[in-house]
Structures are given as structure tokens and as C-alpha cells.
Image: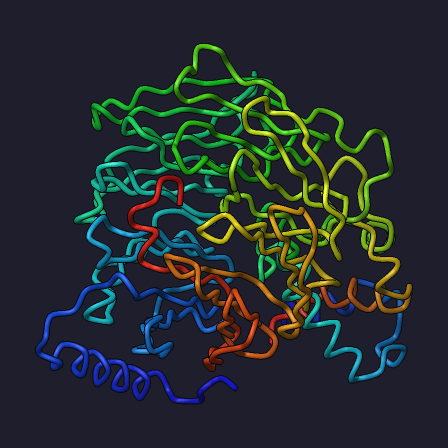
Amino acid sequence: MSDRFSAPLRFLAVTAFAATLSACAAPRGTGDLGIVVERVAGDVLVVETTGRTQLARVVGLGDLSHASAVYSRDGRYAYVFGRDGGLTKVDLLGARVVKRVQQAGNSIGGAISQDGRFVAVANYEPGGVRIFDAATLEQVADIPAVYGLENRRAKVVGLEDAPGQRFVFSLYEAGEIWLVDLTDAGQPAIRKFRDVGRLPYDALVTPDGRYYIAGLFGEDGLALLDLWNPDAGVKRILNGYGRGEQPLPVYKMPHLEGWAMAGRHVFLPAIGRHEVLVVDQEEWREAGRIAVQGQPVFVMARPDGRQIWVNFAFPDNHVVQVIDVPTLQVIKTLEPGKAVLHMEFTPKGEQVWISVRDEDRVDVYDTTTFARLASLPADKPSGIFFAARAHRIGL
Amino acid sequence: MRLMLFLSVFIPLAGLADVAPQRQAELLHLLKHDCGSCHGMTLKGGLGVALTPEALAQRPAEFLLTTILDGRSGTPMPPWRSVLTREEAAWLVDVLRTGGFDE
């Protein structure tokens, strides 16, 4: 259950934790640290994956009902993007908020630049991207997502970092992909790709940083941009994967950011189908489909690429399924509990941490034996973000 | 005061008595967390539109009821008919229009 401490007591508790952390005089790295978002309270837990414990709770991050995080390149600071447009820089070692800015009215996520100097936030309201100095959180650029003849503003989704000091994102209502080059931070160079498809809802960058793929809600297909060769434009892949079948209702939008690439295959959630799509990355053709329990939300590869872990939208959100990559078969169905919202692998993938919102728990599973190794209390947990993301492109 | 105004202006589609108290709690949870996955946990909007009383003021109750039960084609709004009865959906419409979800 959630703790019932009053705000001052919680603050004291956190200060005490922080003092404990810094009083352990031995310097500490962050390679095995991470945060867990408590979506209702608006707090984050600082956790470590070696002993599988909670180290601290950092409070006062605003509305985290939809939240995600990226890391500074030294892995010490998490930049947390809140639903309410708040951008908070959290010091994992000090277990405290370093700085917090209210940069928009409604946000969906963000990214950090290749060199770690800039943090970009994707905003729904006002629709656009704002870019901040990662050290100070001072704004360095504002990119309104204006489209069409009436100069309307679109909600921005699928904001990712890419090599070459670039950010890429999609405009939901506009069906556009924009590529921003920050080589000259004062003068961002923006390249716009129009008519990429209806209602792009999220996107991913492949782990090598080469391809940007946007999922389309409004049609059966995905939009692909080769970042090595943007001149070739955006091309459509997996066009018509539903083949005119009546789509099933989607009670929660899938997330693509937790990319899943294994060998030559990319694994993606189908929209309106209880399937995981398998795409051949060399030809960008469908290589198969795997029937799963429900509408997939996260389709994530274990870091070694041997397994794909999938969670689901309501009403199948109590289940997690594991796909074996060599055979493309579901080999395990776990039932961690009501409302599984997110999964995060340890850097080498021996454990996966799973947030179970309605059970107020984060469970840790062994990815070989599927045994539950630990369970940590957390108040309505959602996103789990480990510091190892600091060194990955597009996360 | 505003709440009173809404209650007096709108004719409820269903009396509160039509949905048992325990089910009401489940429906509020569903509204906050599952509707909230698109419309925001505080229902102030996300990829889906805001569902606050102010945002819905111009929408007829029947339109909201149909939207919940049958979804809106051309948008991601799915039909909830397999999850909710008509009475439950009507109860949710009342809750939305009066801001009754904001404990």
C-alpha cells in the first residue's frame, strides 16, 4: 500500500535517505541504478538492481500520470518528463530534485542529444518541441509544430535522439515527421517530411541510430525514415498489414520507444490486432506475425535479443508474454497482477523489472527461469527507467 | 456552486441508484486509469481530448453516451460496449459532466 506520511514527514524521510546515501563515504557509480515512477503521488523511487532494493524516494515532481525519463551521459541525472509539462532534473546519487521547470501545459516525453548537452521535450499543449540546456534547464530553442494552411498546432509524439546531434519527432494530427539538426544550437535546422501517413502515435529509433519508424494509428502500416539518407524521404512499410479485416478495439495506445530488435528482425505491436508483427530489417518486409493474448503495448527485446517480452492493453493488462526469438513462439505467459504498465531489463538482461500498478508493486523476474526474485512496494508504479539508458541511442 | 449548477441544468441519463456502490468505485478507477491512458489520469487531455465538465459543456449527453458505447470511427476512441452496460456508461456521462470524478 501507499505510505501515508504527510508531505513534511516524507521530505524528512527523503532527506534522511539522501544523507545516508552521501554519508556512505565510498563513491558510487550509477550503472545499476534507476528510477520507478509513482504515477499518482508524482514521486520517483531510486532503486538499485544489484541487491534489488529501493534506496530513496524523491518527491514533488508534479503530475506524473504519464511520465518518462532520459539520462545524462554520466548516468547521474534523470530528466523526468511529466504529464503537466514539468521537466525535472533528478540527482540519483543525492536523491533530490536539482531543478524543475514548468515548460508547457501537457507533455508526452522527451530525448537527450547525442552529446548530452540538450534535452528536448515533446509537447501536446502547446503542440511543439522545446529544447533545454541539460545543465541549467534554460530554454535554448522553441519549435512550434505548426502545420497546414490554417497554421494549426499538432501534438508532438515519438521524439527521439539520433546521431549527428539530431532529434526526430512526429506530428500526430498533421501526419508529418520533422528532423531537427542542432549542430548550431542557436539555429536549429528543421527538415519536414509531409504526408507520412495518418495519425502517427509513437515512434522508435533503431539501436544503431539509423532508422526512425513511426507507428500509424489511422492506417495499417508504418512510416520509415532512413537517417543515413534522409533525401530518400519517408517510405511506407508493412502497408495494409490488417488486410481490410475489422480492427479490434484498442483500449490503450502501444508504445514503440521500447524498441525490439533481435538479429535481422524488428518486433512491433500491431494496432487493433492481437499480434506482434515481425519485420525483416534488411528488406523492411513482413516476416511473420505472432498471435498473443491481447493488444500489445510494449514489445521489448531482452538485451541479448533472445527473447521478446510483451505486455497488453486493458482488459489483458494482467498478463505478460515471452516470445522465443529463434522459434517465434510464445514460450511463457506470466500473470504478475492487475495492470502491468511497464517492463525494464537490467543492462545485460538477466532480470526484468515489471510495474504492477493496481497491486502497488514492482516485481523482479529472472529472465531465464521466470522465477520472481523480488518484489518492491511502490505506490501505483508506472515507468521504470534504468541509468544504463544513458548510453543508448533513442532511449 | 458550479457543481450545483451542472446538476440542476443537466437531466441525468440514469439515477445514481442504477449502479451499485462497489461498481461505481470500479468505474471511477476505470475512468481514471483506463480512459485516463488517452485522456490523462486527471482527464485534462492527452492524445485524447480533455473530458472536464468545461470541455464537455457543449456536448449533448446522448452524444457522450453513444461515444462511450460505440466509439468514434476515424479516431482512436474504442467502443466500450463489451465492458460497460448502458446504465454504467450513462452513469459515467453524469460523472463526467458534473466533475464527479475529481475526489
| Nearer to the camera, A99 or A337 | A337
User: Total label count?
Assistant: 0
Q: Which residue is at a point 21% across and 85% down the rendered structure image?
A: A16
Q: Is residue B63 in view from this perspective?
A: no
Query: Where A191 sits versus A307, above or below?
Result: above
Q: Position of residue B87 (x, y in %)?
A: 90, 68
Residue name at image x 51 percent, y 74 percent? A363
Q: Residue at x 76, y 26 (%)?
A: A240
Image quadrant in which the C terminus of chain A is located: top left
Q: Where is residue A375 drawn, in percent x and y?
A: 49, 80
Residue B36 screen position, x and y as percent: 63, 59
Name the one closer to the observer, B28 or A240: A240
**Most extreme residue toward the left, as rendered?**
A25
Q: Residue furthest top?
A: A231
Q: Is residue B39 left or right of residue A282?
A: right
Above or below residue B97? Residue A229 is above
Tell me where residue A347 appears, x and y as whole percent: 37, 57
Which residue is pictured at 72% across the width and 51% down the height? A295
Left or right of A393? Residue A350 is right
Residue A217, quarter of picture: top right
Q: How is the image coloured?
A: rainbow
Please indicate, yes or no, whether residue A2 appears anywhere in the rendered image: yes
Residue furthest out toward the front: A326
Residue A27: quarter of image: bottom left
